Image: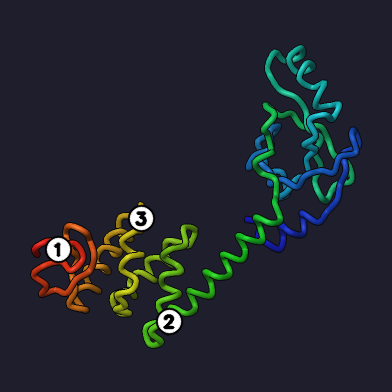
Amino acid sequence: MLNADDCLRYCEMEFYCPNCNTRLSPCETPPFHIGDGLGWGAEVMFVCLNDECPPYVKGWEHIEAAYGHVGSYRYMRLANEEKGELMMVGNQMAFTGSVLDPEVIMAANKRYQQECEWVKQLDTCVADKNLTPVMGILLDEKASLNNKMKASRLLVHLNDISCIDALRNLEYKNGDLEVQRKQAITGILKNNYMKECPDCMEIVKNKAAKCKHCGKDL
């Protein structure tokens, strides 16, 4: 799997199509070689995505006449090869979704580095009474399941009632994580002698006979 540094390095490389002089776009290689079923031997290929490139424009008619199906050609080359070749593509969108985008890569790397920093802080967050790394991980849609499970187990120990609203607005597809989320809410409320109003869902004291927010008898 490509790391951020490798992605950015590939994005800085410049290769040009010999057919139209368009700069080739760095794209993640498909898992299998279209010809022999083997790998490409590289993580990134450079592809001409210019729809006005002559081989691409003429390729549709050629492939239909020669093979009887829809397709055309894109020029491609690998970084470690001096020459490229024409590669058959089945539609106009081929490779457009696998182009390496430096801004997206940098943003993803920044998010990952932040997650790593939060994970380091989990070891001391209870002693430090620091809710930030726990909620940071739980609210991050792309954080790993393992890290979310570890973070969620610390919620009751932190016993910070300020996280209840955020936790109630979460819903996880993973069953075990969802159970831990609900148990954390219950545990934190119990430890703080609080409960939720069944009508307005606001937090009130455990012994309250009437909700101070909506007036419902409890």
Q: Which mark is residue 183?
A: none
Q: Which residue is mark 3?
A: 172
Q: Residue at x 68, y 56 (%)?
A: 103
Q: Regarding mark 1 in the picture, which secondary structure is present there?
A: loop
Disc 3 vs disc 2: Cβ atoms closer than 8 Å? no
**In contact (CB < 8 Å): disc 1 and disc 3:** no
Rendered residue at 26%/68% (across/down): 185
Mark 1 Cα shell of 10 Å, populated few (<14), some (14-19), many (≥20): few
- Front one among 76 and 51: 51
Question: Mark 1 — residue?
Answer: 215
How far is disc 1 from disc 3 in space, using C-alphas?
32 Å
For residue 205, side relative to residue 74 (left or right): left
Give the colouring mode of the picture: rainbow
Residue 139 appears left or right of 2: left
- Which percent across, then down, holds residue 121? 47, 80
Given residues 140 and 64, the one toward you in this image is 140
* Label at residue 123: 2
Name which residue type carries label 2.
Asp
* Nearest to N terminus: mark 1 or mark 3: 3
- Label 2: state its secondary structure: loop
In percent of width and height, residue 156 lies at 28, 75
Local crowd at mark 2 within 10 Å, few (<14), some, or many (≥20)? Answer: few
